[in-house]
């Protein structure tokens, strides 16, 4: 897998350049700039403190080559972790290997934005599932680890961490005393059902948002109803106080480092909480789905209700129940083979099946806590695809790998107990299908790498692009080196500062900076830029249009400054170099 990851990671360059944003903000942090400033809203401090520490430890410079090498390593590690987690949940080697291959395929999205937070959040979410499987044997240590992971997720992306915290709370209340369990379990089931509606309330006037909210809400309701029917476990649960201690200690330590580095508490609150809540109104990428998804979710919810009322699979033979579980697990995995695609949302309503341990003499390898956490986590984390269903769509689907492993493993054990010997062929078949799809991806990666040419720019020597694209970028950088003492990019494309060796003239880093900065902030940037000699602008109109989404760019101080003061000099593919009029 490592060679495939390398070739895929070092092939191509996305014009929207989120990669450059991560590199510029990491370089700022390593050079002593405070995090979470008004001009450079970034992800939470945990990501930068850990990634910055890794770069310092390895002596790496933040550039495109190192970012892609690090991300390729994270990709392979995450894939191995996905396989190990699936093996622990199913105790089936074939399912573990199949999950490793499937995780690798799903995480191909990491190549779209190298060094993004997705690699780290995925690793933490897989760690959360792994920790859940140890809850009965080491309740205190497991609780502390779960709390620390949730705290870390909150201090990277508040939505990912907040959803994980709700899933943990949902699973944890099932281990309380009967009195508290009867009160809090239905309450938490109602909470996870309401979360999608509340989270997406700002855009419920959009059709795709309504359909997505219904699918996730019904899937969550099915998990809640099925969990209420599951029998309480006699084994210890992860310690609630230790969950709080683990999360609290990590949060205090992480924020203390950020504040010591110059971050202000007000900025931390604004950028960690307020800005993410406002972002859906600024920029969205819709999910392609229709009312058919809602119908599937409604049918699955009805089945979960029926199972919870009957509290058993009485009337269904073990062999048939096993076949149904294997079919559900197989479909869950198959729905993720061609990401990014919304097909996985058809499997999301089946997550409730993982809450139900099959009857039989064998010890449940999953554990009662994990049976509640893993499906709830998969359903809630699917909301990562809102409001931007780009690479996030693949990351949002990843929790279903573990859900599919549980359901698949349950079905195999049921068929084996019923004497159906053919059950042993199902996991290798799933593994073979996953490998076949991975082979197609590998062929594409090899072809792209082989037909491309090295970009050869500083910090991106190993990045391979189509010949004409690479030539355009080299010529543009050469012209900037000759003609510009400083430059700004429109939209934000921070990789150009690495390639030219120039420092950014302003503290603004975001791609769609005109969406995030207010007029006073933009005017302050104009005041900084006005006296600069030989100032240029690198503009990519297609990138501007992507951010504008057909609405046009509003008349703001920095936008007006660029339109008024700069004229066309030369073009390089989709890129245009603007110079000061009269220069």
Image: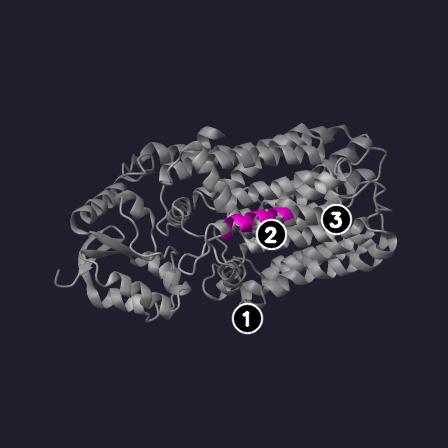
Label placed on residue 370: none
Q: Main secondary structure of the magenta part?
A: helix
Q: Which picture quadrant has residue 320?
A: top right
Residue 139: image quadrant is top right
User: Total of numbered circles in the picture?
Assistant: 3
Magenta segment range? 249-259
Few, some or many residues within 10 Å of mark 1 (<14, 14–19, 20+): few
In this picture, residue 39 sits left or right of residue 539: right
Q: Looking at this view, is 507 or 429 the one in front?
A: 507
Secondary structure under tag 1 reads loop
Q: Which residue is mark 1?
A: 205
Marks 2/1: CA distance?
26 Å
Measured as percent of width and height from the top left, residue 34 is found at 43, 52
SS for callout 2: helix
- Sequence-wise, the earlier of marks 2 and 1 is 2
Q: Is residue 299 visible?
A: no
Magenta stretch holds residue 581: no
Tell me the residue at 60%/50% (across/down): 251
């Amino acid at each position: 897998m490592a060679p495939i990851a390398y070739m895929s990671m070092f092939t191509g360059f996305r014009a929207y350049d989120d990669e450059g944003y991560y590199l510029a903000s990491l370089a700022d942090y390593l050079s002593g700039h405070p995090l979470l400033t008004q001009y450079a809203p970034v992800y939470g401090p945990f990501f930068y403190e850990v990634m910055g520490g890794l770069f310092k430890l390895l002596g790496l410079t933040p550039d495109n080559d190192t970012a892609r090498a690090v991300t390729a390593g994270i990709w392979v590690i995450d894939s191995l972790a996905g396989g190990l987690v699936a093996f622990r949940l199913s105790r089936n080697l074939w399912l573990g290997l199949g999950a490793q291959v499937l995780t690798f395929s799903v995480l191909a999205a990491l190549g779209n934005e190298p060094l993004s937070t997705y690699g780290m959040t995925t690793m933490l979410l897989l760690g959360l599932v792994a920790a859940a499987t140890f809850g009965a044997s080491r309740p205190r240590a497991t609780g502390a680890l779960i709390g620390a992971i949730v705290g870390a997720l909150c201090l990277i992306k508040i939505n990912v961490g907040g959803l994980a915290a709700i899933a943990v709370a949902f699973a944890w209340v099932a281990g309380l005393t009967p009195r508290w369990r009867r009160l809090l379990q239905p309450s938490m089931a109602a909470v996870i059902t309401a979360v999608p509606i509340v989270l997406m309330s700002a855009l419920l006037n959009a059709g795709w948002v309504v359909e997505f909210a219904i699918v996730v809400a019904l899937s969550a309701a099915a998990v809640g109803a099925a969990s209420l029917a599951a029998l309480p476990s006699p084994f210890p649960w992860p310690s609630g106080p230790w969950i709080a201690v683990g999360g609290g200690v990590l949060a205090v330590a992480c924020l203390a480092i950020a504040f010591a580095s110059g971050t202000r508490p007000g900025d931390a609150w604004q950028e960690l909480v307020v800005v993410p809540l406002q972002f859906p109104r600024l920029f969205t990428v819709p999910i392609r789905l229709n009312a058919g998804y809602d119908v599937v979710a409604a049918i699955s919810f009805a089945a979960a209700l029926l199972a919870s009322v009957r509290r058993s699979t009485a009337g269904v033979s073990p062999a048939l129940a096993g076949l149904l579980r294997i079919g559900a697990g197989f479909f869950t995995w198959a729905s993720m083979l061609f990401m990014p695609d919304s097909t996985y949302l058809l499997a999301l309503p089946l997550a409730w099946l993982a809450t139900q341990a099959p009857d039989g003499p064998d010890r449940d390898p999953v554990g009662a806590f994990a049976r509640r956490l893993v499906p709830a986590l998969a359903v809630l984390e699917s909301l990562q695809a809102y409001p931007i269903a780009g690479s996030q769509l693949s990351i949002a689907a990843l929790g279903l790998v573990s859900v599919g492993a549980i359901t698949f493993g349950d079905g195999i054990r049921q068929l084996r107990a019923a004497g159906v010997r053919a059950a042993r062929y199902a996991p290798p078949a799933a593994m073979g299908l996953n490998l076949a799809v991975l082979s197609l991806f590998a062929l594409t990666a090899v072809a792209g790498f082989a037909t491309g040419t090295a970009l050869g720019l500083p910090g991106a020597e190993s990045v391979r692009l189509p010949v004409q694209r690479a030539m355009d970028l080299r010529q543009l950088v050469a012209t900037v080196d000759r003609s510009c003492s400083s430059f700004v990019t429109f939209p934000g494309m921070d990789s150009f500062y690495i390639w030219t060796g120039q420092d950014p003239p302003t503290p603004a880093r975001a791609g769609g900076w005109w969406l995030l900065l207010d007029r006073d902030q933009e005017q302050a940037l104009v005041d900084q830029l006005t006296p600069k000699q030989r100032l240029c602008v690198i503009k990519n109109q297609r990138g501007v249009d992507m951010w504008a989404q057909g609405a046009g760019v509003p008349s703001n101080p920095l936008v007006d400054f660029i339109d008024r003061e700069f004229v066309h000099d030369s073009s390089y593919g989709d890129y245009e170099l603007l110079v000061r009029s009269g220069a």
